[in-house]
Amino acid sequence: MISIFKSFSTELKFYLIMNALFSFGTGLSGVFQNVFLWKLDKTYSLLAYYSLYWSVAIIISFGLCAWIARKTSPMITMRFGFVFYLITYLIMLFFHDHLSEHIILLGISNGLAMSLYYVGMHMAVLDLTTNEKRDQFLYIQGILFTIGGIIAPLLSGLLISQFQGVIGYYVVFIATCVFLFFSFIVSLRVKGNPVTTKSYLWDVIRNPSAEWKKMYSVMFADGIVSGVFTTFLITMMTFKVAGGELNLGLYNTGAQIMSVFAFYILAKFSTSNDRIAIFAIGSVTMVVSSVMLSAFPVFLSLIIFGVFSPIAMNMINTSMNAMIYEAIEKDVNYQQKRLDYIIIREIPLGVGRIIGVFLFLTMKNYFNLEQLLPISFSIFPIVYVIMIPTLYLIWVKPKGRKKVKTI
């Protein structure tokens, strides 16, 4: 891994360090932000509506973020993302006990932060890597992200358990703000590449690459899962079984260690030709481990889930992102249109997130609170398995077709 890291340019190294600091900072608050919001009403409705509001905010604000990227640069857009993440946590600190009354403001701020950050991140990945080496880069990036988050959950759990009430949460949120500031400072060493001021949005909507057009359904399905499952269901299910903030911190530390191991193996041995297989293995593993934890919510099941789910999610997310980037590069003029592709990606993804939240809220009408969490936790990851045949038809079958000779 060290040899791969050394082969990266200085700018790319600073980019990875910047994101490692960002990962550590958000890792301090990440899982505990959901627990904090849950404690405000003791139901899952507030979490669902929070997810809904930031999902809508992302769809609405991505166009604005793209406009900012064109007027400045994608890296400057990313720096604005750090600023709005900082504002999000300041909102939590300012309103604290009355945050439920301002959940729309919190969702909008977080959605804008995510839009600004991910516009810069996706553009940086496209500009600083090539398709052949992108999988290795994404896995190395994942390792640095995860190393930054190994100690963070445990440290947060220890801090929160040392204070009465929610004071520990405020200490953790303040620490997150400090690391977001450091991320912003390091980002000044990454210039990135400017983009054309001309928008090709409608051209990409009407005439995208063939692979991109087929990926719409996949991105929509991915949004359904990410809208609730990866946003708060994993945190709340593991929190319930773990039985407290300190145990949740310990669990997440162990899960992050498994992530580093998985990223290392995948970075060393995987190639761009393995994406579908890696995604399929990750999807099936995620479903099996989720169903097991739902059916048997005991400590042993939590350990099994903690071992396999981080590996599975890394396999799913990295393969998915690599395929999305490749679909963009299939357009012969992708250098001019890459920002527009990134913007349009948020439409099926965002709509999927919103549908996922509404599905969860609908399930809430049919199941009590004790049933809702394990049932939804086991159902939503099944979507990943359903995506496998579509991805196979997009990326594998066309390559396997042989030309028929005509007489």
Image (cartoon, grey):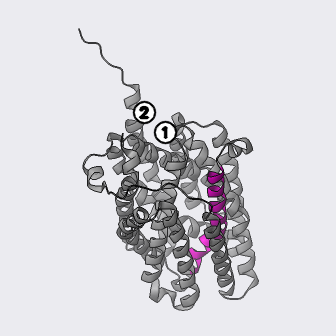
Which SS does the magenta portion mostly show? helix
Q: Residue, x 70% and y 58% (percent of image)?
A: 147
Quick one: quadrant of the N terminus?
A: top right
Query: In the rendered structure, which segment of residues is drawn in magenta?
Result: 10-36
Q: CA distance from mark 1 to mark 2?
A: 8 Å
Give the x, y percent position of residue 303.
69, 58
Residue 184, quarter of the rendered image: bottom right
Query: Looking at the image, which is closer to me, 276 or 360?
Result: 276
Asked which secondary structure carries label 2, the reply is loop
Dot 1 and dot 2 residues touching (CB under 8 Å) = yes
Query: Looking at the image, which is closer to me, 111 or 161?
Result: 111
Q: Amino acid at mark 2?
A: Val
Residue designated by label 2: 396
Residue 20 left/right relative to 204? right
Within 10 Å of the Cα at label 2, are there few (<14), some (14-19), or many (20+) other Cα atoms? some
Residue 175 left/right relative to 274? right
Quick one: quadrant of the C terminus?
A: top left
Give the x, y percent position of residue 388.
43, 43
Residue 51, quarter of the rendered image: bottom left
Q: Which mark is residue 276?
A: 1
Q: Where 39 falls versus 204 (above or below)? A: below
Q: Where 383 falls versus 188 (above or below)? A: above
Asked which secondary structure carries label 1, the reply is helix
Give the x, y percent position of residue 123.
48, 54
- For the image shown, how many numbered marks are present on the structure? 2
Q: Is residue 11 magenta?
A: yes
Query: Looking at the image, which is closer to me, 356 or 78?
Result: 78
Q: Where 381 falls versus 393 (above or below)? A: below
